[in-house]
Image: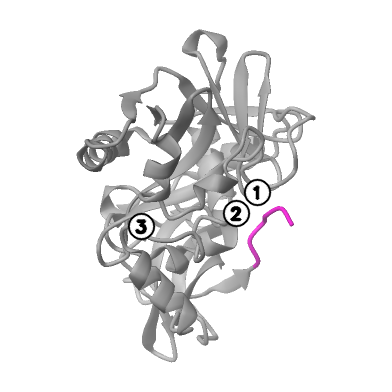
Amino acid sequence: MTIACPTLDQRHAIANARASANLSVPLAWAALTLTGADALTFLQGQLSCDMKLVTAEQASLGCLLNLKGRIEANVVVVSIDGGYALLMPQAQIAAVKARLAKYGAFSKVSIAQGTQEIVGLMGAEALPKALAETSYATLIEADARYVRLPGLTRALKISEAAALAVNADASALAAWQAEAVASGEVTIDQALVDQWQPQELDYHSLNGVSYQKGCYMGQEIVARLYFRGQLKTGLCWLRAPWSEAVDASLDWPIMADDKAVGRVIALAWPDEQQLWLLASVRLVAENLQWHLPNGNVVALTRHDFIRQA
């Protein structure tokens, strides 16, 4: 899939948005609520994360897997009164609701789509001062709920639509996407469904996978990969010099020594001079390159994700 490169003026606007201390970004996200006496035990058998670690102060990354241990959907699980809210892209709601309803038919659990508005907050002044500085920490303040995301100053804000004021321009959303790449946050869209195991997307580093909690769909495959140490690829943040207005494609492989060693999962232009890639690359590969269709070869450099300790 080819992604159109923003113009230089647009990339300048993206850089300015990234530098903002107080940015609110509209996200096409929604929530499913699961309430009832069996909500905890039911989700413990469905999601990859340990639901017992989800509290009023701590949310969790999690995912639904297929029988082959590949991700069907990813969610952020938040504790609410009487149960849990699963936050996810709006496009995932119907499929996730159908799957949970199928397996929850014999459990005391009610599943409904929430009515809350979800926006992204970015910048030192955008997040509440009381929000703990750990990934997926949560806080309720002034009739809104906040969930800190990976990255130094990023969070989700969940509240009623009437209470929110957001920046709806394209540069704000592009800035958000760039920071998601830098923090190693992979959101599963339709193109990525059933393509990746959670360890390949570094979910284990964000406590989105539990190896001790017991059975859930796909758990056997995930555990075998972990305990046998068979993971050969890893998620990485790559930077490329990109001063020209040239489109880029998710289909171009990451190369090393003229061999394909990785796949691009997401990309973003953070400013006028760079292109950032989120890619799954062989752990032992060095001297990474991107071979463009016009014959140019672009050197790629690895960088550590920007995450909380």
Q: In terms of depth relative to the viewer, which is nearer, 280 or 302?
A: 280
Picture quarter with the C terminus = bottom right
Q: Which residue is identified by label 2? A: 183
Q: Which residue is identified by label 3? A: 216
Residue lying at 60% horizontally and 24% vertically, measured from the top left? 145
Which amino acid type is marked by label 2?
Ser
Disc 2 to disc 1: CB gap under 8 Å: yes
Q: Is residue 301 shown left or right of residue 288?
A: right
Q: Which residue is identified by label 1? A: 151
Asked if the stretch drawn in magenta spans residue 70, the answer is no
Residue lying at 45% horizontally and 19% vertically, measured from the top left? 116
Query: Residue 296, can we see it?
Result: no
140 up-or-down from 229: above or below: above
Q: CA distance from mark 2 to mark 1?
A: 5 Å
Range covered by the magenta-colored residues? 304-309
The majority secondary structure of the magenta stretch comes to loop
